[in-house]
Image (spheres, rainbow, N blue to C red):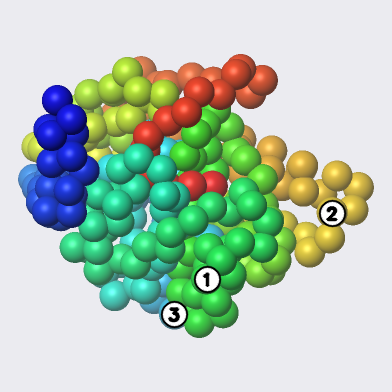
Amino acid sequence: MKAIKNILKSDAVKAATGLLAAGYIWLVYRTSRWQVVNGEVPHELMKAGKPFILAFWHGRLLMMPISVQKKTKVNVMISHHGDGEIIARAIGHWGQDSVRGSASKGASAAVKQMLQALKRGEVAVITPDGPRGPRMRAQDGVVRLAALSGIPVYPVSYSTTRGKILGSWDRFLVAAPFSRGVIVWGDGIHVPRHDAGGAYQNARDAIETSLIDITQQADALCGRETVAPEERDKPVKPHKKGTDG
């Protein structure tokens, strides 16, 4: 059993799994019909090479590589937890870079790298409820990054008519090929530089509410029963999946 676990943790297996994941995303993308809702502003920003912070729930991670334009320089914050290396390899096949670390630890190296990417005019990607949850509850990392950078946050989510919601902590949606898919963008959310009058809490609530709303909208457009957010004060259990907010 130990030998099997060591094999599964090997670099070769992670590389192969990352390649398979990237291939599966491509398969779903190419065999499905996609509709984009409210994407005009972020698409114009990408076309103009202007930076923004892209935020999505951990459970809607799978098809997020297709939400950005091909030539857009993307940096995805991925924690060191669990299968973060597999996620990093998968998005690498889509031409997207990974920044390993956490936005929840103040002026961490990962936050500094994301700030540098934004200064270069690139897109910074973060999952506000990752990697530990609670599900669909925004943590402080995304607000901190937006406040330090002065760059707006654009929430985005997706859903498909075919696929399966897993029983994982994040209720991960595994989209299936030959679907009808919808990508829904929220409006940009600006976070003030300074936390005056509860500004950071208000911004966190606005990001969370927008992400919940657009996820429900995407599910409704695909005829799918939506996933409910987890209670914020529910005890958090360790999780394995790897992007971080």
Relative height, residue 166 to residue 213 (above, below)? above
Q: Residue 192 appears at what percent x and percent y?
A: 78, 60
Report the residue marked by disc 1: 113
Mark pair 2, 3: CA separation = 30 Å
Above or below, 195 relative to 41: above
Q: Quadrant of the N terminus?
A: top left
Q: Residue 67 lies in what quarter of the image?
A: bottom left
> In x, y percent, where is residue 164?
22, 24
Residue labelled with disc 3: 48
Q: Is residue 236 above or below residue 129?
A: above
Q: Given this view, does label 3 or label 1 mark the residue nearer the observer?
A: 1
Which of the two discs, 2 and 1, labels the residue nearer the N terminus? 1
Q: Residue 99: percent from the left, percent from the top?
A: 43, 63
- The residue drawn where x is 13% and y is 34% is 3
Q: Which residue lies at the image location 71% right of the left edge and 47% below the top edge? A: 203
Residue at 22% x, 54% y is: 90
Q: Secondary structure at mark 3?
A: helix
Q: Which mark is residue 172?
A: none
Mark 3 and mark 1 lie on one chain; the one further toward the N terminus is 3
Choose between 177 and 107: the one closer to the eye. Answer: 107
Q: Read off the residue under disc 2.
A: 195
Q: Residue at x 50, y 79 (%)?
A: 121
| Amino acid at dot 3 | Ala
Mark pair 3, 1: CA separation: 22 Å
